[in-house]
Amino acid sequence: MSVSSVVVTLLLKRVRLLCARGAGTGTGSSLTAAGCNRATELCDGGRLIQSRARSSWQRGNSTTVKLVQNGGDNKAVICIEGNIASGKTTCLEYFNKTGNIQVFTEPVHKWRNVRGHNPLALMYQDPERWGITLQTYVQLTMLDRHLSSISSPVRMMERSIFSAKYIFVENLFRSGKMPEVDYAVLSEWFDWITTNICIPVDLIVYLQTSPHTCHERLKQRCREEEKVIPLEYLVSIHQLYEDWLIKRTSFPLPAPVLVIPADHDLQKMLHKYEENREKILAASYH
Ligand code: TTP
Ligand code: MG
């Protein structure tokens, strides 16, 4: 067992302990549980309602009032994160076939077709003009994914509203491809959403790849809109992920992180997912 797996196992135990005690807050440590007090007494037919918040460790405040879906469904939430073509969908499909887990792949089809328009293609053609258009829609569709009701005890999602903001919006802005006013408006939206709506995450699984591997996979996959993606773009996304999830120097972590090296071929990756099954599903034992 590697050092990082031992650390993650210990951390998950700590998170479960905190949950069992009803504590969700913490200051200083980046490894306490995040989320909301699940207000089971409230229910309103799948709509957003106002409730006492499940506390967020970043803010260390357990009394904030937030909007929650159905009063919180008490399901475990696992987000699969990683660079473009790191294998997130493959990972989700594997767990979809092999467990009582409800899987949500990314709504890329929506980003490629909103009422007949393709904001993903437009963004790659002219990021300065269309970056905000795509990212506003990504933020909406991600929020919708986070809030959708499920019947299984575990929700596994491809990416999250957090990585859309901390990685993609940030990359557009830092590379000079998003005007400051667009970045400010998106940030105001993001801050409002995360302050007022309860978006619990119990575990982040980071599929850690080299940008070269992703570039090779992208070329093989040949998604039309992505033909223009140069290696440097993947290097920037990789760097932002490493700063967020490994070095932990950029943005708050919404949950503990399990790192899975993901440069291997498909067979080996399927094996690795199986090896990590218990650690991943430990997030649902709270
Ligand atoms: P990815 O989230 O990388 O999905 P994928 O299916 O390519 O990854 P994997 O192979 O690991 O399953 O993103 C899909 C496309 O959307 C990709 O071109 C990057 C783009 N995108 C943005 O431009 N902005 C965003 O905020 C997000 C989340 C994606
Ligand atoms: Mg995918």
Image (tube, rainbow, N blue to C red):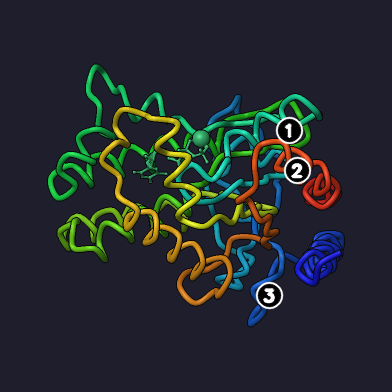
Q: Which residue is mark 3?
A: 26
**Pointer 1: residues within 10 angstroms few (<14), some, or many (20+)?**
some
Residue 194 x %, y %: 47, 55
Task: Tell me the kind of residue under disc 1.
Answer: Phe
- Queried on whether the Cβ of the residue with tag 2 lies below 8 angstroms from ligand 1, the answer reads no
Q: Amino acid at mark 2?
A: Tyr
Residue placed at 51% from the left, 46% from the top?
Answer: 160
Q: Which mark is residue 230?
A: none
**Residue 172 against residue 29 in the figure, above or below:** above
- The disc label shown at residue 95, or none: 1
Q: Looking at the image, is mark 2 or mark 1 earlier in the sequence?
A: 1
Toward the viewer: 217 or 51?
217
The quarter holding residue 36 reads bottom right
Image check: 142 left or right of 258? left
Badge 3, how many Cα within 10 Å: few under 14, some, many 20+? some
Does any portion of residue 196 appear in the rendered image?
A: no
Mark 3 secondary-structure assignment? loop
Given residues 119 and 265, the one toward you in this image is 265
Quarter of the image for residue 219 reads: top left
